[in-house]
DNA sequence: GGCGATATAATTGTCAGACATTTAAAGGTC
DNA sequence: GACCTTTAAATGTCTGACAATTATATCGCC
């Protein structure tokens, strides 16, 4: 009930891409299996090589296949790595947010709801590495002279460590999109010395909660962080409205 | 610090796609803006039209552009819709799970952690429509003679309603991937009459919790559902191991 | 003048053929 | 056996052509 049968007939290259995509998803082609050569595919589908190539480029853009030149090269079904999936997810999420006028409130709410979801797991499973990363980023954020952009980047790194501490790669993958996609929105905020101090304090508290395996404390701290972030966001929006209005 | 500067030089078509992609992401091209024609692009980049076309197909595969034939047609920056983002996300998540031997436990944990994250919001904001959908699906699940596959599909529909009830499209988008991507894993489970009864009961309790605005009850019910689903999954895995071993 | 049919031009979609480049394997030399 | 060369298969790129589509402009008719 998706776009496959919807309305208008697609390009040949789109149809061919869909046929191969389906074969991969349905499991008819396994990871690292080699597709027929472009010449063979163009015979099979009864189209020119250029059309086949356009179809293959579509699949390559989704990381479904990889190509290799030379003898015994060709197109191979790609094992979708977490890394590839991450970057695709982040690109999509970022564009979705920027193109659909998603409010700061909505994005913020989604982000912190998901972070709270992984906090209990993070308390159970965080390693010394995760705690060290979070402490290092917290310290970095307390340095005077740090640009707003660097502060935000460090903020993302800290929250990323929190998410990773949950020890569940599927959860990490899903959340990374939300956290990283918010960075452009967060970058709009101008952090005063006072607000940085407040945030650094909450970050330290959050790390403490993880260290002492206190899910409730972590939850509470994340709630405070959400409220405070929302407040900062609202201030920026208000200032912006005054300027343009 | 991503794959852009990593290692090997990419194809020309990949480079050109990246250049245009960056222009869109950085906001240098706005939604519905028309790209130069293929002929103009091939002049600008100093490559042939085929190469440009391959680049454009890559972008089209990511829903970043759409193309229109005819006079005054061309390639236009596409507004990424929630629907497009959903289906991409689901495709990617499904493949990620199936290709990386993600365990049932891990996927299950991630799914329920995120569902619990949106339960409190769903209690606040659920509409009569959401409740009606959940009740209808619950009722459907109690019908004898329903195939395992249909039972799973209904299960997904119910959980999708829960997620949508949170009233946060960003949260819905992120969670839809996790929930729908799990369906192939869930489809492996053979539901006995007894287990269906148990699940239907929990679904009813969950809907009640939403109706009465009881976030704690919803949370508890979801926890029970997670434990029970895990149990069923483990049984299947154990049976499968006996058969193959 | 208005309106419908038609021509026009711009643009993407497809095809065919050629050549360049890359790469692994086979073969040859010492 | 180690190293170099050749070879063949495959993708990457270019060129030129034609088909299909579609918004706009033009023309003829009333």
Image (cartoon, coloured by chain):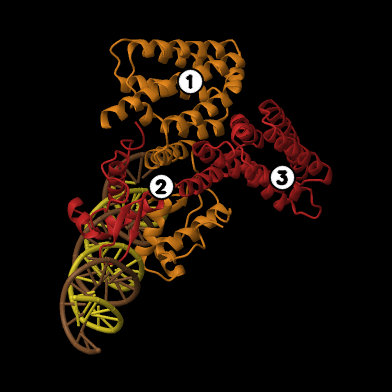
Chain colours: A orange, B red, C yellow, D brown
Q: Return the residue nearer the eye: A78 or C19.
A: A78
- In-front residue for pair B24/A222: A222
Left or right of C27 on screen, residue D14: left
Tell me if A83 is positioned left or right of B112 in this view. Answer: left
Gap between marks 1 and 3, in whole Å?
34 Å
Do callouts 2 and 1 mark residues in contact (Cβ within 8 Å)? Answer: no
Residues flagged by tags 2 and 3 on a common chain? yes
Position of B106 compared to A62: left or right?
Answer: right
Give the label on residue B80, or none: 2
Mark closer to the observer (2, 3)? 3
Q: Name the residue rendered at 55%, 54% in the picture.
A: A29
Label 2 vs label 3: CA separation?
32 Å
Label 3, residues with CA under 10 Å away: few <14, some 14-19, many ≥20: some
Quarter of the image where the N terminus of chain A is located: bottom right
Q: Quadrant of the C terminus of chain A?
A: top left
Q: Chain of mark 1?
A: A
The structure residue drawn at horizontal position 63% and vertical position 39%, both measured from the top left corner, is B162
Separation (CA) of disc 2 from disc 1: 29 Å
Nearest the viewer among D9 and A124 is: A124
Residue B182 appears in the figure: no
Please, which residue is most extreme toward the right here?
Answer: B194
SS under mark 2? loop
| Residue B135, numbered label | 3
Query: Dividing the picture into quarters, in which one does residue B189 lie?
Result: top right
Residue A89: percent from the left, percent from the top?
45, 39
Mark 2: few/some/many CA within 10 Å (<14, 14-19, 20+) = many
Badge 1 and badge 3 both on one subunit: no
Give A5 or A88, whichever is nearer the viewer: A5
Q: Which residue is mark 1?
A: A227
From the top left corner, tell me how far across and down residue B18 is, in percent: 31, 44
Kindly identify which chain the residue marked by label 3 belongs to.
Answer: B
Can you tell which quarter of the image residue B218 is in? top right
């Amino acid at each position: 009930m998706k776009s496959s049968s919807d309305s208008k007939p697609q390009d040949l290259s789109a149809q061919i891409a869909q046929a191969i995509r389906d074969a991969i998803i349905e499991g008819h082609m396994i990871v690292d299996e080699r597709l027929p050569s472009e010449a063979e595919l163009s015979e099979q589908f009864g189209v020119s090589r250029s059309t086949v190539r356009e179809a293959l480029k579509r699949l390559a853009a989704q990381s479904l296949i990889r190509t290799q030149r030379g003898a015994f090269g060709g197109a191979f079904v790609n094992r979708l790595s977490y890394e590839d999936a991450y970057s695709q997810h982040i690109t999509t999420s970022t564009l979705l947010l920027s193109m659909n006028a998603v409010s700061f409130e909505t994005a913020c709410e989604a982000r912190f709801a998901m972070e709270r979801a992984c906090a209990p797991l993070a308390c159970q499973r965080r390693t010394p590495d995760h705690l060290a990363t979070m402490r290092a980023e917290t310290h970095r954020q307390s340095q005077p002279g740090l640009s707003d952009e660097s502060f935000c980047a460090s903020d993302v790194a800290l929250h990323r460590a929190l998410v990773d501490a949950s020890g569940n790669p599927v959860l990490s993958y899903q959340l990374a999109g939300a956290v990283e996609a918010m960075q452009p929105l967060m970058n709009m905020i101008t952090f005063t010395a006072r607000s940085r101090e407040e945030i650094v304090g909450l970050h330290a508290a959050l790390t403490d909660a993880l260290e002492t395996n206190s899910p409730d404390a972590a939850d509470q701290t994340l709630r405070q962080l959400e409220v405070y972030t929302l407040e900062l966001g609202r201030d920026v929006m208000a200032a912006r409205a005054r300027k343009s209005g």
